[in-house]
Amino acid sequence: MTTSTQQTNPNIATGVARSLGEGAFTLEIPGSSYRIRLASAARPHEGRRCSGVITAQAKRIDKIRGGGAFLEPVEGRPRRAQGRVRAIDKSKQTVTVHTGAAPIVFKTDARQKAEDFEIGEMVTLGVEPGAEFTPNG
């Protein structure tokens, strides 16, 4: 079960599909410069709005006391992320972080557990290659 402070699904990211390729595409986040390169088995329609869940493997999640939310780089595959924890799923060992660009569901490193974190806490982390997008619905 996902724990959240919001009534809507905190894991859903929304954007516009661009640069479609074989098994991957770029998710353009409206109102920002973010263009996130993601793997996807489903093929979204070019130029259309799409929503779904972005999942990635965290290298290590560290708690921090301050700072802003971001995803690096602004264009390309996610390599570094920082933001507030929005949801925790103990059964799947995932932590959802709102990165400023979009919420991303991170699988915790084998050395860490999802229950080590709290909703609202600021975290920073490295992101392994292979972030994926699963369409909603």
Image: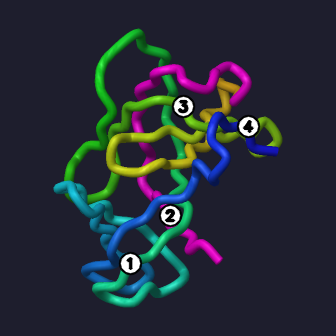
Q: Mark 2, mark 3: which one is toward the viewer?
A: 3
Labelled pair 2, 3 in contact (Cβ < 8 Å): no
Q: Mark 1, mark 2: which one is toward the viewer?
A: 1
Query: Which residue is at the far top?
Result: 65
State left or right for residue 43 relative to residue 117: left
Label 1 vs 2, first from the N-terminus: 1
Separation (CA) of disc 2 from disc 3: 19 Å
Disc 2 is placed on an element classified as strand
Image point 34% across, 42% down: which residue? 100
Q: Position of residue 123 (x, y in %)?
A: 46, 24
The residue that mark 3 highlights is 85
Tell me if residue 42 comes above or below residue 84 in the rendering: below
Q: Mark 4, mark 2: which one is toward the viewer?
A: 4
Disc 3 is placed on an element classified as strand
Residue type, label 3 = Val
Tell me if residue 23 comes above or below residue 114 in the rendering: below
The residue that mark 1 highlights is 49
The residue that mark 2 highlights is 132
Q: Position of residue 20 (x, y in %)?
A: 32, 84
Label 2 vs 3, first from the N-terminus: 3
The residue that mark 4 highlights is 3
Give yes or no for residue 121 being in the magenta stretch.
yes
State left or right for residue 136 relative to residue 69: right
Q: What segment is highlighted magenta in the picture?
A: 114-137
- Quadrant where the C terminus sits is bottom right
Image point 71% across, 27% down: which residue? 113
